[in-house]
Amino acid sequence: MSQATEIIQPNSSTNPTLSGGRGVPDSIDTVETLLADAGYVADRGVATVVFLSLRLGRPLFLEGEAGVGKTEIAKTLAAALGRRLIRLQCYEGLDASSAVYEWNFAAQMMAIRTAEAAGAGSDRAGLQAELFSDDYLIRRPLLEAMQPDPAGAPVLLIDELDRTDEPFEAFLLEALSDFQVTIPELGTIKAPEPPIVILTSNRTREVHDALKRRCLYHWVDYPDFDREMEILTARAPGLAPRLSREVVAFVQALRTEDLFKHPGIAETIDWANCLLALDVIDLSPEVIAETLGAILKYQDDISRLHGSEAKRILDQARATLGPA
Ligand SMILES: Nc1ncnc2c1ncn2[C@@H]1O[C@H](COP(=O)(O)OP(=O)(O)O)[C@@H](O)[C@H]1O
Ligand SMILES: [Mg+2]
């Protein structure tokens, strides 16, 4: 399987609350509950745009800083709807063949050798038909997402689109408009039902307007204090409530500092797990200095927080919490 492909089979069957068309949620509230039950704390904006995307059958384009929960939305949605998740991880140089299909060249060569050895090499037409049959086809994510599935159309996650280049975007624009692929040797393959498409971008560059226009767009922001507390409670339930509040307040304060890279939600959760592993009861400048690598990933940012800076930010964070 390609490094760019990840296919996860659903483990839950159809959910009784999915009474909308195509077995999709019938209200924004239902989306919120479905995601929450699967461990994703969605704000109203996310729940609304997910609902609309499902209802209208439009691709959803999620943009935001790294670690704010974009990829997780697609994963959780697939699990919650009981659909397969098919992931196309984008990277520089990704081309159409790695995204749609390839012929299994090595297996074709083997088949030719075997046919020659068996003296069947003279039936050229027969051999050619066999070599370009389904048996030798390697389905990449976009083609895989067009396969019929009894559980319903899969969730197709096109992750970190900003890592690819413009020609790939142009190709994708076309692929997303009709969900059919023509393989010269096999004919045209069309999805019986279009997949639920979620694209993400960390905005290391602007994605072209034309592609964005095909999609519903949502900017996924850092959560506010209360939502990050909810997320932390769901994802690091072992952390004492008082320490959780300090952790979230500190991370929120850090995000107002002039840093090269602000910590995402993933970092908050990682940090909480580090503190749990170290049996920390209370934040202190020393504890922060020892565990800073869980929340800041650039040496310049880490060195900025040495000395009295960590204490200043901790005091500022505690002030927002009020008396314990
Ligand atoms: N709203 C949320 N509810 C629950 N967990 C979340 C939420 N947002 C982020 N997370 C956690 O943060 C981690 C990182 O999120 P991810 O989707 O990988 O970020 P992004 O794709 O935006 O870089 C996830 O694995 C998940 O554990
Ligand atoms: Mg991601």
Image (cartoon, rainbow, N blue to C red):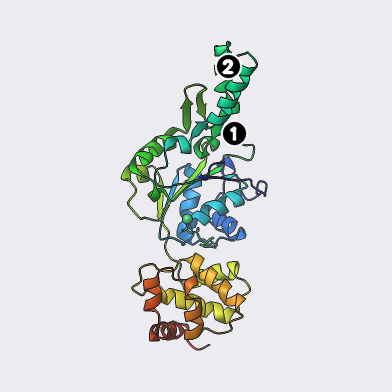
Residue type beneath disc 1: Pro
184, above or below 259, in the image: above
Residue drawn at 43 percent across, 74 percent down: 252
Left or right, 230 with respect to 313, comes to: right
- x and y percent of residue 84 in the render? 60, 44
Residue drawn at 55 percent across, 73 percent down: 272
Left or right, 15 with respect to 288, comes to: right
Q: Nearer the viewer, mark 1 or mark 2?
A: 2
Among the 4 quarters of the image, the one containing residue 202: bottom left
Name, please, the residue furthest toward the front: 117
- x and y percent of residue 108 in the render? 56, 26
Residue type beneath disc 2: Leu
Name the secondary structure under disc 2.
helix
Q: Is residue 104 visible?
A: no
User: Depth check: 154 or 254 in front?
Assistant: 254
Label 1 or label 2, whichever comes before in sequence order: 2
Residue drawn at 46 percent across, 62 percent down: 67
Residue drawn at 32 percent across, 45 percent down: 208
Residue receiving disc 2: 127
205, above or below 171, in the image: below
Badge 2: few (under 14), some or many (20 or more) residues near its Cα, within 10 Å?
A: some
- x and y percent of residue 244 in the render? 55, 77
283, above or below 224, in the image: below
Measure the alpha-carbon separation of dots 1 and 2: 28 Å
